[in-house]
Image (cartoon, grey):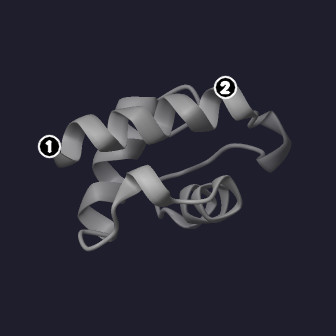
């Protein structure tokens, strides 16, 4: 997965951290958790606030 795979990342995060409310996650934590996903294969510096917001929103949608 790459940073642009926001929906796939959100699904993985939802499955990996089922007890977390994604509305309240800090972007520093979100970034670290994405980097730690086993199928994630992209560079840390390719992330930005817009991408993290998109991942967070997809995760919120997935959790509903």
Q: Which of these two is toward me, 1 or 44?
A: 44
Q: Earlier in the sequence, mark 1 or mark 2?
A: 2
Farthest-out residue, right: 45
Above or below 2: residue 13: below
Q: Residue at x 24, y 62 (%)?
A: 15
Nearer to the camera, 42 or 59: 59
Q: Residue furthest front?
A: 24
Crowdedness near tag 2: few (<14), some (14–19) or many (≥20) residues, C-alpha within 10 Å: few
In this rendering, is residue 28 above or below 49? below
Residue, disc 2: 50
Left or right for 24, reference 43: left
Residue 18 location in percent, x, y? 24, 69
Local secondary structure at mark 1: loop
Q: Position of residue 20 (x, y in %)?
A: 34, 68
For the point 66% across and 25% down, which residue is it? Answer: 50
Crowding near the residue tagged with mark 1, few <14, some 14–19, many ≥20 C-alpha atoms within 10 Å:
few
Q: Position of residue 33 (x, y in %)?
A: 55, 64
Residue 48's place in the image compared with 33, above or below, is above
In which quarter of the view is residue 8 placed?
top left
Picture residue at 58% right of the left edge, 57% below the top = 30
User: Relative to 28, is 58 on the left or the right?
Assistant: left
Q: Nearer the viewer, residue 18 or 9?
A: 18
- Give the vertical position of 57 relative to 18 (above or below): above
Where, by quadrant of the figure, is residue 48 drawn? top right
Left or right of residue 53, residue 23 in this image? left
- Picture quarter containing residue 42? top right
Between the residue at mark 1 and the residue at mark 2, the CA separation in whole angstroms equals: 21 Å
- Tag 1 residue: 64
């Amino acid at each position: 997965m790459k940073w642009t795979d926001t929906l796939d990342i959100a699904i993985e995060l939802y499955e990996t951290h089922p007890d977390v409310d994604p509305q309240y996650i800090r972007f520093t934590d979100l970034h670290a958790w994405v980097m730690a996903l086993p199928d994630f294969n992209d560079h840390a510096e390719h992330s930005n606030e817009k991408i993290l917001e998109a991942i967070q929103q997809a995760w919120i949608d997935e959790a509903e």
